[in-house]
Image (cartoon, grey):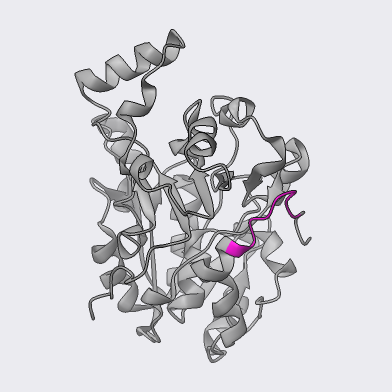
Amino acid sequence: MKKTNRGNTSAPDTLLIFERPELYFFPALPDIVCPAFGVPQKSLRYLVYKALCLLHLPGTHLFWGSWTKRLAGVKRVVIFDYGYQRGMKRYIRRKNPDCEVYLFFWNLITPVRVNHRLFSDKRAIYSTDPGDCARYRFYYNSIFYTRQYRRDWSGKKNRLFFIGHDKGRAGALLALKQKLTRAGISCDIRIVSSSRDASYIRTLGELYSPRPLSYDEYLQQLEECDILLDFNQKGQRALTMRVMEAIFLSKKLITNNAAIQTFDFYSEDNILLLPDDPASLTLDALRAFLEKPFVPYPQDVIDYYDFHAWKERFVPGGRQPPH
């Protein structure tokens, strides 16, 4: 696999604050993606930071990441959901009054995730999920990818890869794997779990994987396959990283996200939408999908979901979901 060209030669106009910038493709954007914190979260200094937060004492910014030194001249800062901490927006605007600051949810809202309640500008909160946009009156922006990873990887014919955490999907994934295999698809489906519960591990059976893959390791697996599986949590309508990878790495996609039909890149040649009950999927439907040749995604789709177009869709006052 060819190495990715990392970094830019000019100062960026946008900073992304992400809790773990070593994940996914973010290492390809080292001048843009910054860690939320400058101290390890499993450390005494982090406990001191949390104490300052709980007591509403000054000085919390001293524990934040290197982005605090890079705000001069920046047009916008996008803070990802897990990275946001109380007071960040106020600090950024004090250092750079002209900077636009946005809170961006690319995960579903859950009862324990209340960052949106702490963010002072309700007109600057975005989500990738149209359902959450409607429920919480957020604005919409999709997930994104980077053309630095753009590849035409055909992979081995009828080989599928998926790796993810359980999230209540293990039983459905195991049943789906059995059906896909009967249709002639070579399936490598893995459920990552750090659990030491032997009985739980037994329920995962052949899907069990004791560790996640680094993104480079993950891409090596994707290079060898021609089909990706996208199996969303119940109620999730957002596009996922696997959809972006299918588009940018030239892969077919099997997904249970019915909302994908509303996007302009949707094509029955490239995307198989699972029925509400995956057990009702017929072998004939699977085989018909396998026989269709992959149709390359047009350049305007690549351009739209690339980072450089994505960042420009953050605007004061926001945008509503297109569907």
What's drawn in magenta, residue-wise?
312-319
Tell me where residue 188 sits by quadrant. Answer: bottom left
**Residue 282 visible in the picture:** no
Numbered circles on residues, count: 0
Q: Quadrant of the N terminus?
A: bottom left
Does the magenta-highlighted stretch encompass residue 104? Answer: no
By secondary structure, the bulk of the magenta-drawn segment is best described as loop
Q: Is residue 86 left or right of residue 313?
A: left
Camera-side residue: 287 or 89? Answer: 89
Residue appearing at x 70%, y 70% in the figure: 263
Q: Is residue 99 left or right of residue 135?
A: left
Residue 109 sits above or below residue 155 on the image: above
**Residue 139 visible in the picture:** yes
Residue 263 sits above or below residue 201 on the image: below
Q: Is residue 128 left or right of residue 209?
A: right
Residue 44: give x, y in percent of width and height: 20, 18
Residue 218: give x, y in percent of width and height: 29, 64
Residue appearing at x 23%, y 81% in the figure: 2
Residue 102: give x, y in percent of width and height: 59, 45
Q: Is residue 95 left or right of residue 99?
A: left
Tell me where residue 217 sits by quadrant. Answer: bottom left
Residue 179: give x, y in percent of width and height: 49, 65
